[in-house]
Image (tube, helix red, strand yellow):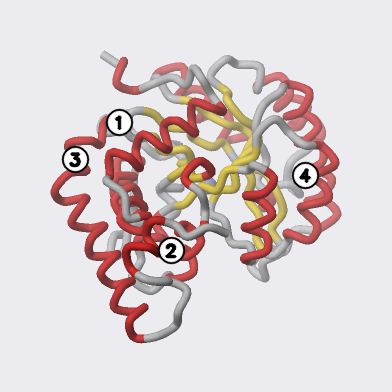
Amino acid sequence: MSKTPSEKATGSIREGNVCHQVNMVAIVLKGRLLVNRMALTYADRMYDVHCHIDVLQAVPNQIRGLISSGIKPSSWVVNLERARQWPINICLGVHPFFVEETTLDDLNRLSELVSNPFVVAIGEIGLDYHKQSTVDRDCQIGAFQRQLRLACSLNLPVIIHCRKAFDDLWPLLEAFEPTGVIFHGFSGSVGDLNRAIDRGDFISFGFPITYDDNKKQRTYLADTPLDRIMLETDSPYMKRYGFETSTPDDVRFVYGSAAAIKGIPLIEMISSVRENVRRLWPALREIRDYP
Ligand SMILES: [Zn+2]
C-alpha cells in the first residue's frame, strides 16, 4: 500500500514508539485547531453520511446535508415524517439488534417504504456478534440476506453495521454485490479494511478518530485512500469526547481530525468526501436550500 500524505508528513504512524505517540498527539491537537480556526467557516459544505435524527427537534443548520438511518419500524416512521418536513435524506432497514422483534409484515412494509424518493439507501443493516448482542445469528443472517436482496432489486446502496462478524458478512455481501457499500463505524481487522478498499467499498469514519486514545481508527483512516473515505457522526449515539451527546452539526470535529491525520487542508478533505458522496448519490437533498 502506498504511503499516505500523513505518513510522509509525520513518519510512519504504525510505529509503536515514543515518536509515534508524540506524532499522534500532535495530529489530534492539529485537528482541534483546524476545527477552531476554519471548520465553522466551512461547516455548511460538509455532509454527515450517517446519523439518527429521531430525537432532533430542529433541522441541523450548519452542514450541507445528511443521511439519517431508521433502524426499526418505529424509527422508520419518525425518519419518514422528518424527511417530509426537512430536506434530509434517509436510509431505512432493520439493525441487527432488532431483527428478532421484526415481523414478516414489517419487512414487507419496508419494501414499500423504501420507494419514497428521499430514501437513498438500505441501512443500517448487517451482523453483530459482539458479546453485547444476544440476537440469534441465523435470524440476523436471514434478515440481512432479505434486505440485501431488496437493495439489489431497487439498485440502492447499503449502509453496513458489522461487529465481530466479518467472516460471515463477506460471503453474503459478495453473493449479492449491491450497487454501493458503506461501512459505518468500521471495526474489522486490517485484513477486512484492505478487503473493503480493494472491493471499492466506502469506509465511513466518525468521532473515534478524534479520541486521544484511539490509535487504531486513526491508523485505519491514514491507510484508507481519500476516494474511499466518508465521514459521519452516528449522532446522538456516538459522542464527542467529554460531551454527553452529539448532533450532525458536530461533524466538523470529525472533518478537522480527518484532515489533520491525512495531512491535507480541511477544504480538501471536505471536497473529497463531497465528491465521494456524489459518486454514490448525484442528487442528494441539501439543507442549505432549506428556507
Ligand atoms: Zn448508526
Amino acid type, label 4: Leu
Residue at the bottom extreme, as displayed: 18
The residue singled out by tag 4 in the image is 173
Q: CA distance from mark 2 to mark 1?
A: 23 Å
User: Which mark lies nearer to you, 2 or 3?
Assistant: 2
Q: CA distance from mark 2 to mark 3?
A: 22 Å
The x, y position of residue 264, in whole percent, is 31, 49
The first of marks 2 and 1 along the sequence is 1
Q: Is residue 281 above or below residue 269?
A: above
Nearest the eye: 187 or 31: 31
Nearest the eye: 251 or 9: 9
The residue singled out by tag 1 in the image is 45
Amino acid type, label 1: Arg
The residue singled out by tag 2 in the image is 218
The first of marks 3 and 4 along the sequence is 3
Nearest the eye: 37 or 228: 228
Helix, strand or loop at mark 2: helix
Residue at 64 percent of width and 42 percent of height: 200
